[in-house]
Amino acid sequence: MPTIDDVKAFLLPQGIEVLEFAAPTPTCETAAAAVGCQPAQIAKSVLLLVGEKPVLVVTCGDTKVKSSKLKKATGLSGKVRLPEAEEVIHHTGYAPGGVCPFLLSPQLPVLLDESLARFERVYAAAGNAHSAVPVTLAQLQVITRGSRVEVCDLISP
């Protein structure tokens, strides 16, 4: 299981810093309050199981993954569900509330939702529930080798 120190070491050569906070940051709202941005600018990493195949979607804090769009983008079929905490740890190496899009298994597909393109910079978790990583969508795409897709809709206020 990667630690925040592993994430820091991984991002350092790329000139990307990890921010750490005393206050917990496990939700978009708490992370936004700690960072000083709007919840939409939090790049939440959501693990979903399509059938039994894991997929990580990185999207804005004000969006929700649409099952039909996810299945179309991945070519997978079956029920889309949120995994239990143990499954999240098994597939990502991170506990819920701190799932980070870095240092993942190369077998885990990473999808970057186009909603992220609305912002110059977004803030992803760094592997624990007290951290954030300011990154651009271009940096996310290079670092995660993720595919840009449209799989989310804005959450209605």
Image: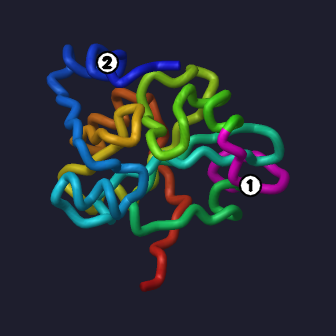
Q: Which amino acid, mark 1?
A: Arg
The quarter of the picture where residue 4 lies is top left
Q: Bounds of the magenta span?
A: 72-85
Which residue appears at 53% of the width and 37% of the height?
A: 110
Nearer the observer: mark 2 or 1; the answer is: 2
Q: Quadrant of residue 40?
A: bottom left
* Residue 76, position as x, y percentages in the image: 76, 46
- Image quarter hosting the C terminus: bottom left
Residue at the disc numbered 2: 5
Residue at the spot x=31%, y=54% of the render? 31
Packing grade of label 2 (10 A; few <14, some 14-19, many >=20) is few
Colouring scheme, one of rainbow, by chain, secondary structure, one colour:
rainbow
Confirm whether the magenta stretch covers residue 27: no
Residue on which disc 1 sits? 81
Q: Residue at x 45, y 22 (%)?
A: 103
Residue type at numbered disc 2: Asp
